[in-house]
Image (cartoon, rainbow, N blue to C red):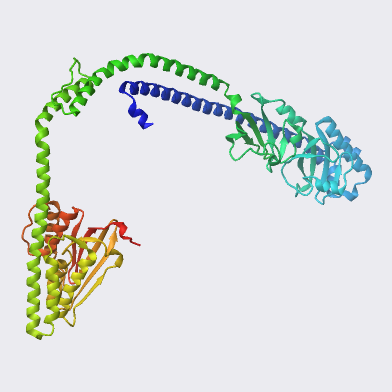
Amino acid sequence: MKRLLYRLSLRQKIILSFISIAMIAVLCMNYISHFYYSRTTQQDFYNIAETTTESLNHQLEIYFQQIAKSTYAMNAGVLSYSSVLMQQGDSSLIQDWLRDGLSIGPEKQAMIREILNKYIAFNYPEIDNMYLMSKDHRVLQSSGTTTDTELARQPWYQLPLSTSLEIMPTMYREGSSMPLISASIPIFDVNDTKISGRLVLQMRLTEIKNMIGNMRIGKTGYIFMVSSDGEIVYHPNSSLLSSPIDDTELSWLKLGESNSLQEWEGEKYLVSYSISNLTGWKTIALVPLEEMATGLEIAQISAVVVMALLIMLIMIAVPFAANRITHPMMQLKKAMEKLQTGDLSVRAPITPGRDEIQLLSVSFNRMAERLSELVNTVYNMELKEVQMQLLQKEATIQALQNQINPHLLYNTLDIIKSIAFLEGVPKIEKMAENLAYLYRFTSKLDQKEISLKEELEQLKKYLEIIHIRFTKHFESKVYVDEKYLDARIIKLSLQPIVENAVKYAVEPRNGKAAVLVSAYPDGNDLMIEIADNGLGMDVAILRNLQERLASITNQAEQRMKSYDSLGLTNVHHRLVLFYGKGYGVDIHSFPKQGTVVSVRIPFIKSYNIS
């Protein structure tokens, strides 16, 4: 794609850009309108569905509560001051049967059934049957007979007596395909107001069907009910009644949220439900999203038409405008191509105007004039400057190494002289051998960077000389893992620091001191630490030395001044010149405890750090 864009001319890019921007704008507008239209449609559906389902729940609650209230007088018996009914002897038959069924003979039980059947006939014809149940699980039904096995299958039979109205979900009567709902109404003893039994009404779904009727949302949307345990209480498709919703074609529904947009078989559905406080049932409204957003397709078609018209307009207008814009730029391009070939006399044509292209042409002409004056001198000056800087670095490094060599030689000769005076000849041979090795090592000025292994070998030779001088108490140790030995370091970077440690930490304590050398990685760098347990440095001296090191870091190209602490500043100066400002020497000292000097050098991970 990038290669194709590179091949296009500016005019083609302008046309392509305008068309792309227009298409993106229209597509964004289409997407935004679709998004907000869909969201508004969903919210409208949720509002309507919530109102509808809550209203249905409220009507059902009122319906069941009215049924329960209408049975209270029948369950309690006729009041004592109703003398006419008292003479008939059936004023409290239900209460008596619930207290002691053995005292109620078949004749009075028939009267109780007659009372129940009259209640059904005069009040609620949708009631299919009624059951009286006592605390001791005796059952008397209004019509027909039911075996103990059949009673045990009833959803209310095994439940403990409750003081509140309970509604059982859809069930089927034995030998019938007609769905029923059971309403369990508590009965209280009129003497002590304690619960004495329940009245169970088995009702057909007639009233629920009348309430919901053929209510639909859209063409195929509908309302149905599910119990708290997941069974379908009511559905327009009667074959789904009393079935667990997970075992039906509605198993894909997720009823975790009261309002949600769900997808099934590639089609999106709006789902909303409310829960009845009395029954715990969910009244669910379900409708395809497409049916609630009939205007969305028209909006999309309109957007496509607008986009097509806009593209046609751009295809006509943009090429003309592009020519007007790009013509001066094409002239400037030709002038630049000539300048690229080395023709410094070329100039871009200037036309009246103050737009960016004309200003660019003026700037190009000025640049060509300046370029013709400077092109022959700038390159030579920069080349000479680079060469001078390189020579300066080489000379500085060379001079620094030459400064170190006499210093090392003089200190070593002084040590040899002292030992020769105190102990005689036996140790001169070893010291002379190590001194010769060190001198030969430092005299090779052509080799500036060596391996850490080579640097440590010459350092150990130096430490052997110090051990000969301070035989009894001086200790030294080099803790450097073999995996760091291939690192590259400027020659004579560690020995001057160790020599300083001997001078300022070991000698003042007459050799009763230790010098430790260790190394560890720090990111892509290697840190080498030289630590001693001498008397440390005064705070003012330490601060002064740290300021000198910082000054060298910031002005490494300047000639180094002569300092008393030649070793540290010398090593730091060479490391900064060779590796850059991020590298060099850092020093920390602790009064009465010792001094730690850290040397940071680059370390490439190809050296196989594990």
Does any portion of residue 458 appear in the rendered image? yes
The quarter of the rendered structure image containing the C terminus is bottom left
Residue 389 at x, y percent in the picture: 11, 48
Residue 124 at x, y percent in the picture: 80, 31
Residue 547 at x, y percent in the picture: 13, 57
Farthest residue in the right direction? 107
Does any portion of residue 83 appear in the rendered image? no
Farthest residue in the front direction? 341
152 and 109: which is toward the camera? 152
Say whether residue 403 is left or right of residue 154: left
The quarter of the rendered structure image containing the N terminus is top left
| Circle count | 0
Quarter holding residue 413: bottom left
68 and 354: which is toward the camera? 354
Say whether residue 244 is left or right of residue 307: right
Say whether residue 6 is left or right of residue 240: left
245 and 43: which is toward the camera? 245
548 and 214: which is toward the camera? 548
Q: Residue at x 59, y 26 (%)?
A: 290
Residue 440 at x, y percent in the picture: 12, 69
Is residue 378 positioned above or below 461 on the image? above
Q: Residue at x 28, y 18 (%)?
A: 325
Quarter holding residue 396: bottom left
Is residue 296 positioned above or below 285 on the image? above
Quarter holding residue 395: bottom left
Is residue 375 positioned above or below 568 on the image? above
